[in-house]
Amino acid sequence: MLLAIDIGNSNVVCGLSSNNHWTEQFRIHTVANKTSDEYEVIYRTLLASRNIDLKEIDRVVVSSVVPSLILPIREMIRKLFNQEALVLGPELYPRLDIGISNPYEIGTDLVANAVAAHNKYSGNCIVVDFGTALTFTVIKADGNLLGVTIAPGLKTAMASLSQKTAQLPNVDLVVPPSCIGKNTVHAMQAGIILGYKGLIESLLTSMKKEMEGKTTVIVTGGLATVMLPILNSLDHHEPMLTLDGLKIVGNQFYK
């Protein structure tokens, strides 16, 4: 059984794969100063609650965009599973099926997304990941990772607006009834949700113009479901895309 761990800025998302199929998924809040002992208690409890025998897990693959958590998570994995984790990073990139021109400047979650997108879909791909940051990862048909575009994520933008203003609250991320807000809540939702609709579709249109041939747009990330009903430029929703990429890397390197 393979355990994939994706350490993001807001959440740590984990998946258990058996016979190349996901059997369990869970997520916990990211706390950058947690110790390996604290994570050991959390993971031992979560796995026990799902009746998972620790001895069944023989492969662990990790991606992290929070550098301070790599060491505690690796130590936790040693204690729980008596093995070393395979940590996705620049030293592994030359052996992947994608080309990365700036290996030390790209998040490992985006690399995992690119690996999964290139493996699942032929031709050019754009992965739109709705997380703490909103990212667009562009992969050419030949596997070359062309580049990345980054904007504040939906929650990040909303939190910044409410924290930096005296009279604006932090409101739910739902589609408003109109692009013209009739009250404060709808006004903020229109600016963030419908404003991001314009941002996303404009960027995708411009990106596709720079690509040769058909381009497939894949959407992932925890906040994707907020935008899916109102976006017109999407081809596939892959909520497990990052974990799928880690699974592909794990299967390749654990052969």
Image (cartoon, rainbow, N blue to C red):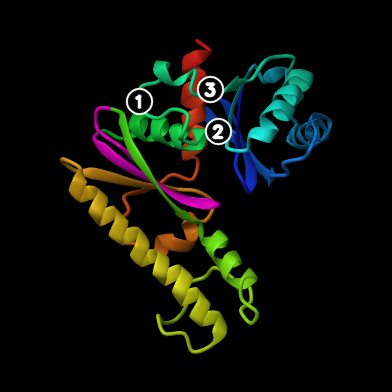
Secondary structure beneath label 3 = loop
The range drawn in magenta is: 123-142
Secondary structure beneath label 1 = loop
Return the residue nearer the eye: 186 or 144. 144
Secondary structure beneath label 2 = strand
Q: Foreground mark, 2 or 1?
A: 1
Position of 245 with respect to 145 (left or right) is right
Disc 2 designates what residue? 22
Return the residue nearer the eye: 141 or 21. 141
Q: Residue at x 31, y 56 (%)?
A: 203
Q: Residue at x 74, y 29 (%)?
A: 72
Disc 1 designates what residue? 98
Residue 137: in sight, yes or no?
no
Q: Residue at x 72, y 41 (%)?
A: 32
Kindly identify the amino acid type of the residue bearing the numbered disc 3. Answer: Asn
- 3 and 1 marks in contact (CB < 8 Å): no
Q: Foreground mark, 3 or 1?
A: 1
Is residue 133 inside the magenta stretch?
Answer: yes
Is residue 70 inside the magenta stretch?
Answer: no
Residue 19 bears which disc, if any? 3
Q: How far apart in space, not on screen, are marks 3 and 1 (Cα)?
A: 24 Å
Position of 57 with respect to 211 (left or right) is right
The image shows residue 94 at horizontal and vertical percentages of: 40, 17
